[in-house]
Every structure is written in C-alpha cells, then in structure tokens.
Amino acid sequence: MQSLYYLIPMFLIILFIFPLIIQVRVSFNLEELSGVICLFIFKIKVKYYMYQIKGKKIILQNEKQTKIKEFEFDPSQLVIAEIFKSQLKNKARVKELFVFYNIGLGDAFRSAMVGGVINTAVLTYFTMLKNKRPTASFGIYDTISYNREVFEVAGKGSISISLFDVAYSLLMSVILIKNLAKQSKKEQV
C-alpha cells in the first residue's frame, strides 16, 4: 500500500518532463480591425477571445465577459519579454504552422498580383523555418476574391514544450535581467 504513494510524485515528474502540445489559432479582419484568438492544449480549448482594436484600446470578449484594455508599452517590459522569448525560442519545437488568407482588392489583376507577392513572401519565410526545423509542417492556403474588397488573415500554429523548459527559461530570464540591472547600476556610478 505504501508504494501507491510513490505514484503521485511519479505523475508530477512525468507531467513536468512530458512535452505539452500547445496550439494557437488567430484570425484577423483588416477592414473591421477585429478577429479571434484561441488557445488549445492537447486539442482542448483553454481560452477563447474575440478582439477588436479601436485606437490604443483592445476590446476582448468571450462568452462570459467583456474586457477593455488599453496598451502602452514600457521599454523595460519589452526587454523582459524579449529575453524570455529568446530563451524559449531554442527550446520550443514547432510542429506545424499554417497560414490562411482571403484577399480581394476589387480589381482582378491587382488581387492576383498581391496574392502572388504574399505567397512568395510567406513561402520564403517557411523555407527559412524549414531549414531550422526540418520536422515541422508548413502550409499556405489562399483565396483570391476577384470582384470584392476583403482582407482576412488566419493562422494556426502548434508547438511542443515541456513545463521544465518553461520554468528553466523563466529562471534564466530573471537571472539575465538582474545581471543587466547590476551592470547598468555600475555604469551609472
């Protein structure tokens, strides 16, 4: 009976080391400045928000509540996010990345040309990513509306990362930020 108590720490260790599959789906309509963002973990929906941009305000809505947030970025916050992002970048494994878009400029020729430019740019970026992450799946799906004006973009990305990697990256980011703060204090003196 005592050996059953060992299952609890074993479960926590496996959960900490086992990689999480995180999927993010984002869409954006340029004409209405609105879209949807949804976060899945192991294909289970965790968060879902419809958002709308009005000036410096972002209105977030889900089934239960509406939040209005005004964003002003402090340079110190951007440094913290940049360091954390660089720490996570090498540890996260990209599983898939797909881009969907619907574009129409009212003129068939201009719509086709802009669609071709977008395809070339996205495929060039995907080629660069494929050299770094050879096991990942990439795709682009386009729809050209030749007789109406529309610009909608959506993306679906999936990565896998373990909780240990997230905790390690967060710890390293805190250490690097404290080292930067110490160096800036020394330079000021």
Image: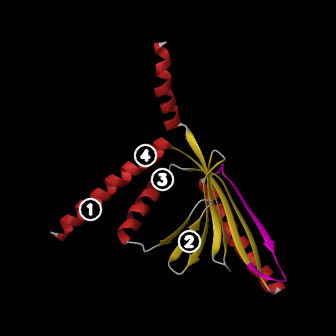
Magenta-colored stretch includes residue 43: no
As shown in the figure, which amino acid type bears the numbered disc 1?
Ala
Disc nearer the start of the sequence (4/2)? 2
Q: Where is residue 85? Give x, y as percent.
A: 46, 58
Region in magenta: 134-150
Residue displayed at 34% across by 54% down: 174
**3 or 2: mark nearer the eye:** 2
**3 or 4: mark nearer the eye:** 4
Above or below — where is 59 with respect to 10?
below
Q: What residue occupies the far left of the structure in this picture?
A: 189
Disc nearer the start of the sequence (1/2)? 2
Q: Is residue 75 left or right of residue 17?
A: left
- Mark 3 and mark 2: span between their CA atoms? 28 Å
Say the numbered circle drawn on residue 59.
2
**1 or 2: mark nearer the eye:** 2
Disc nearer the start of the sequence (1/3)? 3
- Is disc 1 in contact with disc 3, using a CB cutoff of under 8 Å? no
- Mark 1 and mark 2: span between their CA atoms? 34 Å
Instruction: Report the coloring of the rendering.
Output: secondary structure
User: Which residue is label 4 attached to?
Assistant: 167
As helix, strand or loop, the secondary structure at mark 1 comes to helix
